[in-house]
Image (cartoon, coloured by chain):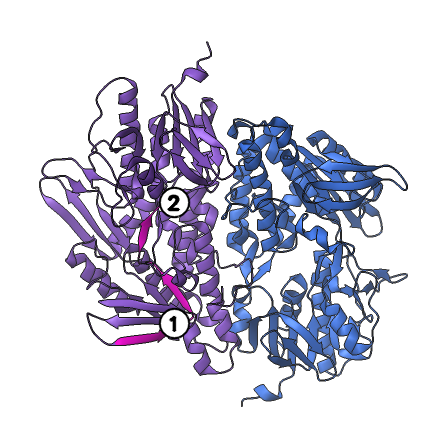
Chain colours: A purple, B blue
Amino acid sequence: MNATTARPRVVILGCGFGGIEALRGLSRADVEITIVDRTNHHLFQPLLYQVATAGLTAPAISAPIRHVLRSQMKRGNLTVLQAQVTGIDTAGRQVLLDDGQQLPYDHLIVATGATHSYFGHDAWSAYAPGLKTLADAFTIRSRVIGAFEHAERLADAAARAPWMTFVVIGAGPTGVEMAGTMIEIAHHTLPQEFRRIDSRRTNVILLEGSPRVLGAFVPQLSERARAQLDRLGVDVRTGCMVTGIDADGVDYREGDGGPTRRIASKTVIWAAGVAASPLGRAIAAGTGITLDRAGRVPVEPDLGVAGHPEISVIGDLAAARSYGRGEPRPVPGVSPGAKQMGRAAAANLLRRLAGQPTRPFRYRDYGNLATVGRKAAVVDLPVPGIGAVRFWGFAAWLFWLFAHIYFLIGFRNRLIVMLDWAVAYWTYERSARVVAEPPPTQGEP
Amino acid sequence: MNATTARPRVVILGCGFGGIEALRGLSRADVEITIVDRTNHHLFQPLLYQVATAGLTAPAISAPIRHVLRSQMKRGNLTVLQAQVTGIDTAGRQVLLDDGQQLPYDHLIVATGATHSYFGHDAWSAYAPGLKTLADAFTIRSRVIGAFEHAERLADAAARAPWMTFVVIGAGPTGVEMAGTMIEIAHHTLPQEFRRIDSRRTNVILLEGSPRVLGAFVPQLSERARAQLDRLGVDVRTGCMVTGIDADGVDYREGDGGPTRRIASKTVIWAAGVAASPLGRAIAAGTGITLDRAGRVPVEPDLGVAGHPEISVIGDLAAARSYGRGEPRPVPGVSPGAKQMGRAAAANLLRRLAGQPTRPFRYRDYGNLATVGRKAAVVDLPVPGIGAVRFWGFAAWLFWLFAHIYFLIGFRNRLIVMLDWAVAYWTYERSARVVAEPPPTQGEP
């Protein structure tokens, strides 16, 4: 009895946390699944900054999609395609690929996430790369390591200063992690390796537009994180709006109407803005939905698109709300949110196939944590009925460490990451400091 | 007593096996050393094919030069520069760098190795990348993995064939290792991971101009290697001269005056020709030396350049001879040769500084080994006075494995490589199958 042609066709776009969980939720369903991603790997994005700062190798935090999904593959109802999606024909119910192929669907789950946003200043991207993909991480690694190499070549000490000044824009978790790690590399990994420069005289400047770092955390934990950044030697400047970035540095304004200042720097990293995947516009064009300011697709309580229950949008591309007790609340753009939406979208799809009503999505907040360099982190764990448990410092760092290793996909990856971190912890050496190509001249991409 | 300015200035070009050993040989000398490399890492080239075939990560077989040389760094007489050498002013005794800097030297050791040679057909390089650097390995990895992904996207089975046909040109150790590993990936790693294609139907064709594979080995071991390649399923074609390579395949002639044939293939790898580093020409221009046909610099018995004893040339850039018992014999272009020349050049430099006569270089042949896919290798160990011990198969493979791990620089690297290989051995899974960028369309670089 071959029922292949009669099976409902489910297409999933994106193999991030949301897409993979949606697929897992459909693992036993009698459906024909196609999953599409631009790359060949699933990426554990929370540790991407470690690849950018040479602490981990790329394969330690990523795995081939085909390998991750191999057990589903054996069921014979899954096709994995590495392709770029160029559009969605919502009326004709098909996805358009860059090679001209069309993928017809009965159900579509869109989980293509977010990318950097330079707030309309796309020219900045050449001078201040962001951190979303492995290619981004390699670019940043090459620029950071290359900057020290360049400085060592310069005979004139004054000319070295912009090469030994690093600016991180945006003090969310990624910006804080990057700044904390970069100052540690300068102060602990590199000092004895250069002859002409003293890497301990490196400046790492963290610029943030809002009044505090880690704005998504409670003020108490922001203060703790800031104190730790100060102790590490990071120059934290809050309330600073970036007004320009070029090949030689960054311009910013201090506060509203404050003075404009300039930092001469050859290495700038963008950790400030996030914009939803451009596929949001394709969905909006086909369905008449209005995107929110960040380009996200507003979804119904069951994560479907209004008027198009056959399309679900999940993860960072969705402007979703959590329907628990009390008023619906926005779901934060974090990986547990994407995973939970993936599971919920799959469950609702199964309910619709069974002729049952769908259920509203409810986000379970398991807490919020961020690391601040070596040996320090902040942790905020909600405790239902009581409030929250908050802690910081070394205990929080250990908690962060084990949580991240636990959630890493694949036993081997966990082992490699633990080994790399154990070595790094005792020796300060970073295992992945090799750069495949001589770095291009900074600011002249 | 600061005698820095009075110390002899030694400049070493290249941080491969030769350059690093030369530096180690000078570690206790009262000299001022500058070592220059185009990249930031020392590379364990014998395992580079494992990075290209996704078995190992790049940092597992490479280490930052500054880290490798950190103990010398502490002595305070070493400068490491990541720079491109653009010329050598042999009359003025200075090295020219790409940023316009000049490095004056009293003694120069040139160890910049070799690169690919396309025998005058440089246009082939776009379609058939060679394997000398990490960047090369990433290019090949991306093309090989991308070819299977591309084939999976094609609905037309006939159109898939060129994407599932891989051609390796040149059956030296690198070509044999690449072909053997690629067929294993196709037959053992990937089969259950694709829906539309059967990766076991992949063709790997190994083209060799001479009558046998592994021409540097004795015929008996060539035959063993060929038998193993046949067993693996590699299509070995000896006596075949490549006459053309383009975006869609390879043309070759069978034997002298034989028929011309065509292989339709989207993925071609060049493992055939080697040419000495272009710095050979700079030395020839300044010293009047005539390079040999491969572009190598003929050196005196003590590895110095005739008329310029202050310049030594070592490794793959040198056309050196070994002065043992009997007639002087050419030194083969293998890593033990480069290492031994590095040590000898350093020792002769120390002798010259001490006013002693230099000694002729003597190459010690510790044997020759090559692996042929999983669980098989060929080993040829000379035994002085007796002849040679030759063996093959699993025992040879174990010997190869431990020899390579033993010589890998850095304890952590050895551990990671052993772990990766243990996992790969039992599961056939390859740990580094991630590709940072979607691969460019093959043949349209």
The spot of residue A332 in percent (x, y) is: 23, 45
Nearer the observer, A106 or A222: A106
Which chain letter matches label 2? A
The kind of residue tagged 2 is Phe
Whether residue B389 is in magenta: the answer is no
Drawn side of residue A263 relative to residue A384, left or right: right
Please say whether residue A262 is one of the residues in the magenta stretch.
yes
User: Residue A385's image quarter?
Assistant: top left
Q: Is residue A444 left or right of residue A319?
A: right
Amino acid found under the numbered disc labelled 1: Gly
Above or below B221: residue B36? below
> Residue B173 appears at what percent x and percent y?
72, 46
Please give the chain letter of the residue carrying mark 1.
A
- Residue A123 quadrant: bottom left
The total of numbered circles placed on residues is 2
Q: Is residue B53 above or below residue A391?
A: above
Residue that appears at 51% across and 30% down: B193
Q: Which residues are magenta?
A: A260-277
Q: B361 left or right of A304?
A: right
Residue A30 vs residue A259, the one in the foreground:
A259
Residue B59 appears in the rendering? yes
**Marker disc for residue A249:** 1
Residue at 77 percent of width and 58 percent of height: B364
Label 2, on which residue?
A44
Say whether residue A119 is left or right of residue A265: left
Q: As drawn, which residue projects farthest toward the bottom?
A: B1
**Residue A287 % position (x, y):** 30, 35
Residue at x 71% of width, y 51% of height: B124
